[in-house]
Image: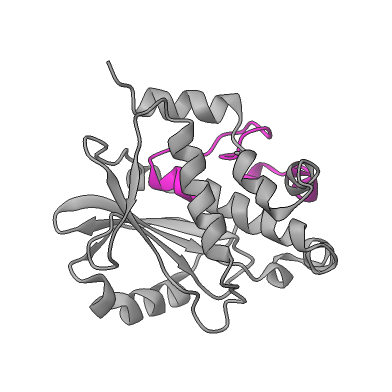
Amino acid sequence: MDAESRTISILDGSACRLAFLTAFGLCAVGSAGAQNLASLAPLDASEPISYFIAEGEPGSEYRPADKDLAQWALEAWARNSGGALRFVPGTEDDALIRVLFVPASSGQYGEMRAISVQGRRGAAVFIRPDTDALGPEIGSAARADPLLRDTVVYLTCLHELGHALGLQHTANFEDIMYFFGYGGDIPHFFGRYRELLGARSDIRSHSGLSAGDVARLRALYETP
């Protein structure tokens, strides 16, 4: 779902946001790019991990309720971590995980980039909620079905937050960490999750994680 990542140092999130977003807008790589393994590593979970979810940037097609989708994605990872992960809200200046809703670029669904926050490893997660930019099949289906649109945004949040936590892509179509570069029926990837939903609130009770996703997460954050 994402492009190649690079590590960026951020000392003051709010002061640097404009330059930060401009850099990402100009440097986006095609959606076939794989996550750079050098950018992937577990976060320090010895204490609660702080996060910040920003309002959407102009032109991103962000909706205020999209914050819920990012929040629910964080909760899904925490709930399936076997108690290893706990997330707490923080400020934009000091949060280790920062979720930003940004305009469409090169057909990307989302992107994760490693950051340094006052000497600590963190992650910036970029979500592109403009489903019309993801091709005519997904775009038209999402316009006709708001729950499908929310499915796409939620699963994108889930995938990119998986990278933020250090998880690599997989070749298993059942995994949320599946890499679209392997091909497969991408509308079905989203459609099978959409079929689980009767209402938007159902997203909170259907994690979207496979057994393989959970096993790899727990192995990465293994506790005694």
- From the viewer's perspective, is 203 left or right of 214? right
Residue appearing at x 68%, y 59% in the figure: 150
Residue appearing at x 27%, y 37% in the figure: 45
Up the image or down, 198 lies above or below 89; here it is above
Q: Which residues are magenta?
A: 160-189
Q: Is residue 174 magenta?
A: yes
Task: Indicate the position of residue 63 as horizontal and vertical percent values.
Answer: 60, 73
Q: Is residue 216 magenta?
A: no
Q: Main secondary structure of the magenta part?
A: loop
- From the viewer's perspective, is 86 left or right of 132? left
Task: Indicate the position of residue 148 as horizontal and vertical percent values.
Answer: 76, 57
Look at the image and tell me whether residue 81 can be seen.
yes
Residue farthest left in this picture: 119
Up the image or down, 196 lies above or below 105; here it is above
186, 55: nearer the viewer: 55
- Here the colouring is one colour
How many marks the image carries: the answer is 0
- From the viewer's perspective, is 74 left or right of 15? right
- For the C terminus, give its image quadrant: top left
Up the image or down, 170 lies above or below 133; here it is above
Residue farthest top in this picture: 224
Residue appearing at x 38%, y 40% in the figure: 166
Location of residue 104 by image quarter: bottom right
Look at the image and tell me whether residue 2 can be seen.
no
Task: Indicate the position of residue 209 as horizontal and vertical percent values.
Answer: 59, 35
- From the viewer's perspective, is 25 left or right of 95? right
